[in-house]
Structures are given as C-alpha cells and as structure tokens.
Image (cartoon, rainbow, N blue to C red):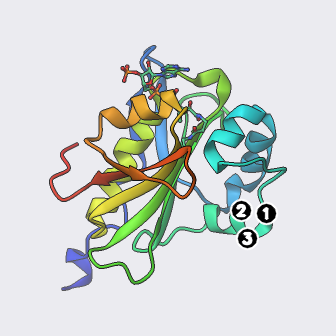
C-alpha cells in the first residue's frame, strides 16, 4: 500500500453537539493535555472516581498520564471531549481503550468518565460512539469494561451499544462487552 493509500490512524478530531446544543470537539489527547487531566481528575467527585476506577484513587500516576497522552490507536487510544469555540480548553470528559494483549479475536478494555457538572448532556454517549468507531477501524472486535451493577448512569449509556453482560471480578460488578463487528455509527 502506498503512503497515499494509507488510512489515517484516526478520524479525529470530530465536531459534534451535546444534548443542550453546545458545540464540542472530540479529539485524541496529547502531551499538552497532561495538566488538564490532573486538574480534571482532582475535580471529580469521590463517587465518580470510585465508579470509574472501582475503588478509591488519590491521583493519576505518571505512567497513567503518559499512557493517556500518547496515542497508538492500534494498541491504545484516549479521546477527550471539550467545548468548541471557547478560547481555552474546557474539558468535559475522556474515554480510552487498551488492547488486551494476545487476544484473538482482538478485544480491548475501555473506560469513560465525564466531569460531574456535565453529566446527562450526552457526553459519554458521544465519547463511546467515537471510541467504538476508532476501535473498529483498528481491527478490534469487541470492547469490554467492568461496571459496578449499581452504576445506573453507565448501564443506561451502554443500552445504546447493544452490550452483552457477564459477571465481573467481584460479586457487585458486571463486565459489559460491546460487539464492534457490525457496529454502525
Ligand atoms: C457514567 C457516565 C460516564 C455517564 O456520562 P454522561 O455524559 O452523563 O452520559 P450521557 O449524558 O451520555 O447519558 C446517557 C444516558 O444516561 C442517562 N443518565 C445520565 N446521568 C444519569 C443519572 N445520574 N441517573 C440516571 N440516568 C442518567 C441519560 O439520561 C441518558 O439516558 P438516555 O440514553 O435514555 O437519554 C458519568 O456518569 C460518569 O462519568 N460517571 C463516573 C465514571 C463512570 O461511572 N464511568 C463508567 C465506568 S468505566
């Protein structure tokens, strides 16, 4: 395949709108986002952080920040959503996938989080939609994510992605599998 025919690593950045009409951009995170990620994590409510990480967590480690800000879509990708048009970045949320090494068919683990003040505006649904699209382009057949069974907002978000559920690693968690082979965005 010639350089001209090579497909771009991602279709990002993409413009979209939240449910209230606010214009937003979804884009791959870069090293410039490191400080915003640190701040965004600190601003998360303890409840949201617990739901995302299935446990209490004081901060994002340096290696987690490295991972979130360096993209290799065939292996891992982190997408941020932010308001468009404002002079400075105003982050809304982040979703990421990471390939399950050696999986066949190829699967990847995913996670998503939206800042508390922007819940219910469709941010997570947009993030997950684009995460699925990018994962599918990169040959991933299925995204899997562990969710607390009390996490009704996330279970609601997942309803739009045709998931299958299995018991999780703890008795109060479920693993959601999002099939991507026939995924239509
Ligand atoms: C779960 C989470 C990502 C949802 O983000 P969000 O941007 O609010 O989700 P959306 O706005 O796309 O909402 C999608 C659906 O959930 C519903 N919803 C959102 N917040 C809700 C709430 N607090 N209670 C009940 N339903 C809720 C919306 O009404 C919407 O329903 P619809 O599809 O029928 O219209 C967000 O609550 C979050 O960041 N939680 C903490 C981290 C987490 O739990 N991550 C998941 C584990 S990886």
Mark 2–mark 1 CB contact (< 8 Å):
yes
In the rendered image, residue 14, in percent from the top left (x then y), is placed at: 39, 43
Q: Mark 3, residues whose alpha carbon is within 10 Å: few (<14), some, or many (≥20)?
A: few
Q: What's the mark number on residue 63?
A: 3
Front tag of 2 and 1? 1
Q: State the CA–CA distance, disc 2 to disc 1.
A: 6 Å
What is the residue that sits farthest to the right in this orientation? 58
At 62% from the left and 44% from the top, the residue drawn is 52
Q: In this view, does 65 lie to the left or right of 182?
A: right
Q: What's the mark number on residue 61?
A: 1
Which SS class for mark 1?
loop
Q: In this view, does 159 lie to the left or right of 128?
A: left
Quarter of the image where the C terminus is located: top left
**Residue placed under numbered mark 2 in the picture:** 65
Mark 2–mark 3 CB contact (< 8 Å):
yes
Quarter of the view holding residue 60: bottom right
Determine if the C-beta at disc 2 is less than 8 A from ligand 1: no
Question: Residue 107 or 29: which is nearer the viewer?
Answer: 107
In the rendered image, residue 115, in percent from the top left (x then y), is placed at: 65, 32
Q: State the CA–CA distance, disc 2 to disc 3.
A: 5 Å
At 62% from the left and 28% from the top, the residue drawn is 86
Mark 3–mark 1 CB contact (< 8 Å):
yes
Which SS class for mark 3?
helix
At 36% from the left and 78% from the top, the residue drawn is 103
What is the residue that sits farthest to the left in this orientation? 182
Mark count: 3
């Amino acid at each position: 395949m010639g350089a001209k025919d090579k497909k771009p690593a991602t279709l990002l950045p993409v413009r979209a709108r939240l449910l209230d009409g606010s214009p937003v951009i979804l884009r791959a995170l870069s090293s410039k986002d490191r400080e915003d990620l640190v701040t965004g994590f600190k601003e998360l409510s303890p409840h949201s952080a617990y739901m995302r990480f299935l446990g209490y967590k004081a901060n994002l480690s340096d290696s987690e920040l490295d991972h979130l800000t360096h993209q290799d879509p065939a292996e891992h990708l982190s997408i941020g959503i932010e308001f468009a048009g404002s002079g400075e970045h105003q982050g809304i949320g982040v979703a990421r996938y990471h390939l399950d090494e050696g999986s066949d068919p190829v699967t990847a683990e995913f996670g998503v989080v939206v800042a508390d003040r922007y819940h219910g505006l469709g941010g997570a649904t947009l993030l997950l939609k684009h995460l699925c699209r990018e994962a599918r382009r990169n040959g991933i057949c299925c995204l899997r994510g562990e969710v607390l069974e009390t996490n009704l907002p996330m279970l609601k978000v997942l309803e739009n992605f045709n998931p299958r559920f299995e018991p999780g690693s703890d008795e109060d968690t479920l693993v959601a599998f999002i099939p991507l082979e026939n995924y239509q965005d």
